[in-house]
Image (spheres, rainbow, N blue to C red):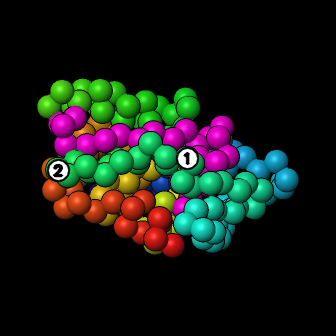
């Protein structure tokens, strides 16, 4: 009996240690890919400051100033459709999975949403825009994919996320809420 308990405890400790090592390694790689800061040897997530100039919203981050209206000039609001803002990283396997799911559901659910995609690992303006969207939802952009659907968001994506994505689209399609038009553009 004692040997069994000791064996179980050892197995649990080894699994926990392995999980922590894996988690630390994956987080380090995610940070290096997601938030490469050329001006610093430590990772800092830039804080956004929003100002309005003659109805044009601009966002300033540590080293990137963006014109939000220019980046979102093609975004439109349509009755019966929800805008989906999809912030992803080129080469991210979870982002690729979400791209595939959007392709799979387009025929059945595409009439309920407009999809706007922003690559943030290699595009500083899109990354700053992602931070602005996250901040406007009282959260932080801590990784990809980060997907905003109406007044809800999803961080990360796995094989079980397809049904959650579809649920959010169905919930939000008729509400008429849009984070850009209802919050960000009004700032």
Q: Residue at x 23, y 30 (%)?
A: 106
Q: Residue at x 54, y 54 (%)?
A: 69
Q: Which residue matches tag 2?
A: 80
Q: Which residues are magenta?
A: 109-132
Residue 21 in picture, x, y percent from top left: 59, 48
Which labelled disc corresponds to residue 71? Answer: 1
Q: How many marks?
A: 2
- Could you say where residue 141 lies in the image, as x and y percent from the top left? 53, 58
Left/right placement of residue 11 relative to residue 49 reads: left
Q: Position of residue 2 (x, y in %)?
A: 35, 60
Q: Nearer the viewer, residue 61 or 3?
A: 61
Residue placed most toward the observer, 67 or 30: 67
Number of other residues with Cα within 10 Å of mark 1, as a class: few under 14, some 14 to 19, many 20 or more: few
How many residues crowd mark 2 within 10 Å: few (<14), some (14–19), many (20+)? few
Image quarter of residue 166: top left
Q: Is residue 71 above or below residue 102?
A: below
Q: Give SS at disc 2.
A: loop
- On the question of residue 165 being in view, the answer is yes
Residue 127 sits inside the magenta stretch: yes
Taking the spot 20% from the left edge, 52% from the top edge, the residue there is: 79
């Amino acid at each position: 009996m004692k040997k069994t308990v000791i064996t179980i405890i050892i197995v649990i400790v080894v699994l926990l240690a392995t999980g922590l090592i894996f988690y630390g390694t994956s987080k380090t790689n995610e940070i290096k890919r997601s938030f490469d800061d050329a001006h610093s040897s430590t990772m800092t997530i830039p804080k956004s400051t929003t100002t309005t100039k003659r109805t044009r919203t601009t966002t300033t981050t540590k080293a990137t100033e963006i014109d939000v209206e220019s980046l979102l000039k093609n975004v439109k609001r349509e009755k019966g459709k929800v805008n989906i803002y999809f912030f992803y990283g080129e080469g991210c396997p979870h982002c690729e999975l979400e791209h595939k799911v959007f392709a799979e559901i387009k025929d059945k659910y595409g009439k309920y949403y407009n999809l706007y995609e922003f690559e943030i690992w290699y595009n500083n303006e899109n990354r700053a825009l992602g931070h602005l969207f996250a901040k406007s939802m009282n959260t932080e952009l801590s990784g990809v994919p980060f997907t905003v659907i109406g007044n809800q968001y999803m961080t990360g994506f796995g094989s079980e996320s397809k049904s959650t994505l579809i649920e959010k689209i169905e919930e939000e399609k008729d509400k008429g809420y849009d984070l850009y038009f209802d919050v960000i553009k009004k700032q």
